[in-house]
Structures are given as structure tokens and as C-alpha cells.
Image: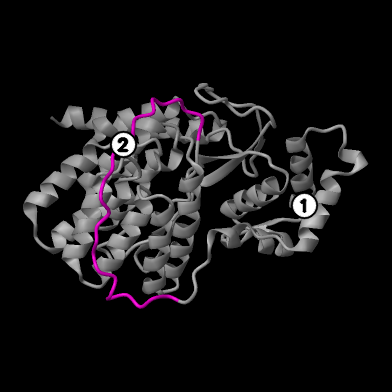
Amino acid sequence: MSLDKTIALICFMALSGCTAKKIEPPQVIAIPTTSASMFQQAAQLPELEDFFYLDEKQKKDFLTHFNSQAQSTYTAEHRLYNYLQNKLVYFTYEGANNTAQVALQQLSGNCMTLALLTTALAKLVNIDVGYQVMYQEPMFDYKDNIFISSNHIRTYLYKNNDAPKKGEFVLQRAALIIDYFPDSGDVTGENISPSRFYAQLYNNLAADALLQGDHDKAFFLSQKALQKDASYTPAVNMIALMYYRKKAYPEASQWFDYGMKQDNNQITLLSNYRDLAKKTNNQQLLKRINQRLLGYNDDNPYAWLALAIDAERNQQFSDAADYYKKLLDKAPYLHNANLALLRLYLKQQNYSSAQKIVEQAMQYAYEPARLEFYQMKLTALKQHRKKLEKMD
């Protein structure tokens, strides 16, 4: 979520994947010690256990199912899976960040809510849970110059007695996958720790508070997120944005600098810091951020989409084209991104690049109607280029 034109924050509800990585000792980076006195302390904020709370009736209902004769032939994780399947028949998928208790009461919530509910039930019967982000082509809502987007969350129920022993390296544990909107075009993210998941819970509430205009609450919820994971960049970004809105530019800069020292989710933070550099006319900083931004790599190809849309809205067509190309480098099959880049090339009368992007898109156009559409575009481009060559 972001600020007036100066800020375009994307709310990522991001979780994990199945990527093996070399584990390096964490680098200790001091969190900025800026004053919070300009923010009014919000009313009581939720504690971590509040997210996972279930009332006695809900616990009894689940445990009765779990221990029933009908479930006795299933493994523990499969019993939980079966319970969720029965409940989710009536579940309404909406954008609300509900707690586990509310999710069962109302049978509604977003994918983070379902991850919460799955975790709350798993805690009752000692089943290990894992989380994963599945990057999907997002539906953007642009409200008050705030980009709103979310990533799809997949939850894993690990097989009991299958936890890795101390010192043992396991690439991937056996698990049941809880995935409510699977799609063959999803891009898999990386595994995250429970502390990262908890930080995301708080930061999603901070995003809700920002949309409701409660900047002070957004600030303190993001502070809670960093108490769970001090390296969670979206929370760092949110805090920097809140200082920015207070016109406390030195404090905002300290938080942006801190975020740049983290190792993930930097694209939105870098974009926001770039806007601050423009606002303060810091050309040296602006150059450094632009170089960092265009050289940055991210396992989420859609992270570039908001930047491309925002650049195009502000008639920064060259930047928009660069962002669309970064997106398509990782996800060349994205129809909307191919169309957007084609439109930009045609606007610039760059017909050679336009033809190349159509030819690339055709390689991933599996539906007959889409392939026919690209073929028509390609034919028209070739004919137009021939006419231009004859005129030269």
C-alpha cells in the first residue's frame, strides 16, 4: 500500500517454496532508533496467540472429527486435511484478514486466514506446518494512489515423525498440500521461517490500517511485525512510508537505508526510496537507487508489474518498458505483460522490437484464440515494416 504519487507500495502476503539454499550465518544489522513520538500509540494491538485462538466449541468439533472412528485409518495430517475439506465447501474467499476463530465462525477470509486456520488446528494435534508463496498474475486495485496486490499462499501439513534430525539436511519433507486456488502458471517462491510468517500477519493488518487511513496504527503494527522478524522488508518499507507521510524525511531515509541492507523484497522499497530521493532532489541517491533497482533480481516476477503500471501512468515509457521486460524475463507467458510491452513499442514506433515481442509471446500462446490473435498482430507488423522499407 502506498502514498500519493510519491509512494506505490505493494502489499505482499508472501510465503514459501521448496528451494534448497546454502544457509549463511545471519548478518546483524542494527534497526534504526528513530523516535516514534510523532505517532499516536494505537489502541490494544493483537498478540500472536490472538491470531490462532479457537474457542472450546471449535476445538471440540475438530478433535471429535480428528479422533473419530471414521478417521482412524488416516494419518494425522490427512485427518486435518479431511476436516478442512469438509469446512471449505462452504468457505467464502474474500480479502479479509480474519483470525482462526472468526474464520471458523464465518467460514470466510483470504488465503492468509486459511493458513492461520490450518496452523491453529495443527497446533492442537502437534502437526508441523509449512508455508509457501505461489506467485500468481495479480489483480491490481489502484486506490488513492495505493497499489493493492496479494500473493497466493500454499500451506503444507507435514507427515508426523518425519522432522529432520539435528544436523540432517532434508531437501523436502513429505507433506499434504493445502492449496485452494492452484494454477498451472503459478511461480513458486522460497521457504520461510515461522517468524517470517508471523511478521506477515502483522504487516497485513498494517496494510489494512493504511487503507483505512489510520497511519499511526499501521506504524505500530509494522513495528510488531519487526519484533517477529527484524529483516522483513515490507514492514520496514511500511514504517519508512509512515515517516514519509509525516514529512519526516531523515527518519524515512534511515528506514529505507536499513531495508536496502536486507536480502529480499526490495523492489517496492527501492521504488519508494527513489520517490523520496526525487522529492528531496538528491540526485546522487537517485542515481544509486536506479542502478540498484534495474540490477535487482527477485524470485517474484510480478513484483515489477506495479512499477511498470505506475511508470506508464506517469508517461515514463522507457522505464515502464524496462520493468515489463524484467517481468517477462521470468514469466514470458504473461499475456497482459506482453500486450503492454507491445503497446509501448508501438507508441515509440519501435516496430522491430514489437515484432520480436509478438514472436516471443506466440511461443507461449497455447489457446487457439490467443495464438490467432498474435498471428494477426505479427502479420500486420510485417506488412507495416515492408511498407516502411519501401518508403526509405
On the image, the x and y values in percent for residue 381 come to 32, 32
Pointer 2 with pointer 1, Cβ within 8 A: no
Residue that label 2 marks: 326
Q: Position of residue 144 (x, y in %)?
A: 37, 69
Q: Residues within 10 Å of mark 1 (few under 14, many from 20)?
A: few
Q: CA distance from mark 2 to mark 1?
A: 40 Å
* 304 relative position to 388: left or right: right
Location of the N terminus (image quadrant) = bottom left
Residue 349: in sight, yes or no? no
Q: Main secondary structure of the magenta part?
A: loop
Which circle's residue, 2 or 1, is located before the other in the chain? 1
Residue at 19 percent of width and 58 percent of height: 253
Mark 2: amino acid: Lys
> What kind of residue is marked 1?
Lys
From the viewer's side, name the closer residue of 89 and 266: 266
Residue in front for this viewpoint, 86 or 64: 64
- Of all residues shown, which one is farthest toward the front? 166
Q: Is residue 129 visible?
A: yes
Q: What residue is disc 1 on?
A: 87
Kindly state the secondary structure of the residue where label 1 is placed: helix
Horizontal relation, residue 139 to residue 102: left or right:
left
Q: Position of residue 367 (x, y in %)?
A: 56, 32
Q: Which residues are magenta?
A: 17-42
